[in-house]
Amino acid sequence: MSSAPPERTERLVLLLTQHQEPLFRYIFSLVACEADARDILQETSLALYRKFDGYDLSLPFLPWAYRFAYLQVQKHRDKAARSPLLFSEDVIDLLAHDRERMEPELNQRLRFLDLCLETLTARDKELVTSRYAMRQGAVEMMQRFAMSRRTLFRNLELLRQRLHDCVTRQLQSEGLS
Amino acid sequence: MNLESRIHAKLDGEITPDQHAQLEALLRNDWQARRLYLELADQHARLLQQPALNTGRIMQPSVGRLTVRWRASAIIASAAAIVLLALVIWPRKAVDKEATSNGVAVLSQTLDAEFSEPNVRSGDTIAPGKLTLNKGVAQIEFFSGATVLVEGATEMEILSAWEARCVRGRVRVHVPPAAKGFVMHAPDVKLEDLGTEFALNVKGRDSAVHVFEGEVIVHTKDKAPASLKVGMSLASTAAGVLPEDFLPISELQGLIRQREQRRFQQWQTWSEGVSKDPRLIAYYTFRHAPDDRWDRLVSNFAHPQDKIRAGGAVGAQWTQGRWPGKEALEFKRPGDRVRMNLDGTYAALTFACWVKVDSVDKKYNSLLLTDGYDSGEPHWQIYEDGSLMFSIGYAASGEKRITARYNQVYYSKPVVTADSLGRWHHLAVTYDNVSGMALQYFDGKEVGREVSALHQPGRPIILGPCELGNWGLPTQGHPFPIRTLNGAIDEFAIYHDVLSPSEIQTLFEHGQVK
């Protein structure tokens, strides 16, 4: 493994720090599994570290990083090609393509997400905290909220759908003026 | 099971192979399905990383877990440090590409100046090139720090921030220590300034120099460089140089002050007349009432004076307007605004104002907006691309809120551009509910003319509670958008009629800075 000189490494640390969140979101949208996405993010960070010499600092970082992330996603897919729960190559391709076009809009949606989270009922907030902040598993949550597995996931689905609708509404009314 | 449920099942890892195959088929064939999936996946990914809830219980178990996984592979330990650091620090906003300009100087002040080059105005940034003054006085500040005062018929060539040429006419040059080395060319001679003030007169092929202060090195073709010190002059036959021929900067400043006072007085007289226009709904000239101890009153000067229509400043601070002595309100912070309540139902409108925009830094930058955005309420803003944006909407029958389908938006061409920032400009819009025509003006000239396809004649226009420079009380449940104007307003007139293009032109001419 070739290693970049220290100041270049610092530069990469900074860039990764700045872009780690959008990079994770990009990868996640292509695999839809958190653990896989985290693994791929690590592989991608490594690939970026190795290939950092080839990066032109005057160009935006994310499009460059997405190319590596995309390759890592395909690589990950090839390793587990038999799994029926992974997207096929052509679907990943379509999603990656659409996502890059939609990116500004997705970023705009996130601005409203925080506001919409505040509008949730106390119980829904509990669910969000438990599922996302505390990373509780299904069994733990079923006990905590005294719900069947089916009800639990149904509730999570409804909650996320409400958030999505709220964001869409906010976006539409902002488009107005 | 519908598309949404399949997507959620996928995100939760609860999807069965059959459902997965169905989801995949939908994503493959339908771009709208992909769009919905990408929106939901992105939302989920964000929640996984930042469950921003005010529960005070946000934990970061993922980092701990990652550390363990990373330790397992020692080969890549150095990169692990990078990734871990990346995981704990929240990302900042990416920096956009930096704007550039090829300017090397600023035309900082002018007095009755006329240039041969079109569209040269006080405050302009000057790029290298010719600058020909036909009459008047102009002060040019080079980015190096050197200042050149140009008087009468003078032809200059700006070469860089450090170099200029006087082709003919009279210039006076001031070079502070920071700009030492500034070079002024004249026919057959090159003057290198060592931190001084000197005057130069060029007539035909002849030049004359006089040093008021400091030292100048004179380079000529044949002779060795000569040093010229305080009080010394160097003149060839035809061109003479008498120190008293050159306008000192202090005098220019005095003349400019006088002119500004004259302009302010002229405007005041004119404004008295405007305030008697019976078509006015309200007329704010931002004259600060001396007896207003709260300092927040923005009086309505439309005759007969209607106190109910006075505005109330919130946050916004008093500052200088178009001329010294003329007041304005400055809008900077997200809360800054002027609140008003303008009752009545109207068939037509004109908004006309003097605004100095410092920056178009938000998506929407408020001029005048009604609270909320209900049927018949106009909004007037500067859009992010610098265009003026007038909008009015009428909700579908039975609905209160206006949806995108019923929103009539009129954009002018972009006018508030880098070149017009930081200066006083006249903005106006007229609209009537019969023709549906929205006309927008910038410095008296038409910049937008449009009738919306959604227009239906005869629907009423309402203002009610509204504000200048902000939109702070938006529709219920709407997130709190920041639309503060970044700039200052020093005159705002609201009419219940359409002013003609020539009337708008007159408003501009009488109100312009010079």
Image (cartoon, rainbow, N blue to C red):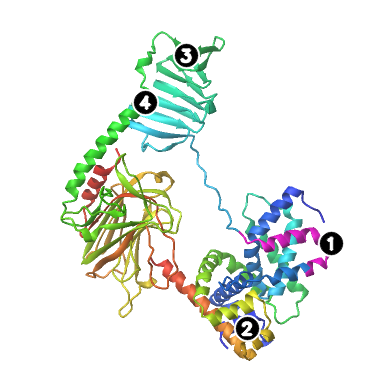
Q: Secondary structure at mark 3?
A: loop
Q: Give me the C-alpha separation between circle 2 and circle 3.
A: 86 Å
- Horizontally, residue B80 falls left or right of residue B122, namely right
Marks 4 and 2, the one that precedes in the sequence: 2
Q: Which residue is mark 1?
A: B75
Q: Where is residue B494 drawn, in percent x and y?
A: 24, 57
Check residue B9 in the rendering and tell me which mark sits there, or answer none.
2
Disc 3 packing (10 Å; few <14; some 14–19; many ≥20): some
Check residue B242 in the rendering and tell me which mark sits there, or answer none.
none
Q: Chain under label 3?
A: B
**In front: mark 1 or mark 2?**
1
Q: Give me the C-alpha separation between circle 1 and circle 4.
A: 72 Å
Q: Do pointers 4 and 2 mark residues of a single chain?
A: yes
Check residue B250 in the rendering and tell me which mark sits there, or answer none.
4
Q: Give me the C-alpha separation between circle 4 and circle 3.
A: 19 Å
Q: Do pointers 1 and 4 mark residues of a single chain?
A: yes
Q: Chain under label 2?
A: B
Residue B165 or residue A28, whichever sits in front: A28
The quarter of the rendered structure image containing the N terminus of chain B is bottom right
Q: Amino acid at mark 4?
A: Ser
Q: Amino acid at mark 1?
A: Ile
Q: Secondary structure at mark 2?
A: helix
Q: Do pointers 4 and 3 mark residues of a single chain?
A: yes
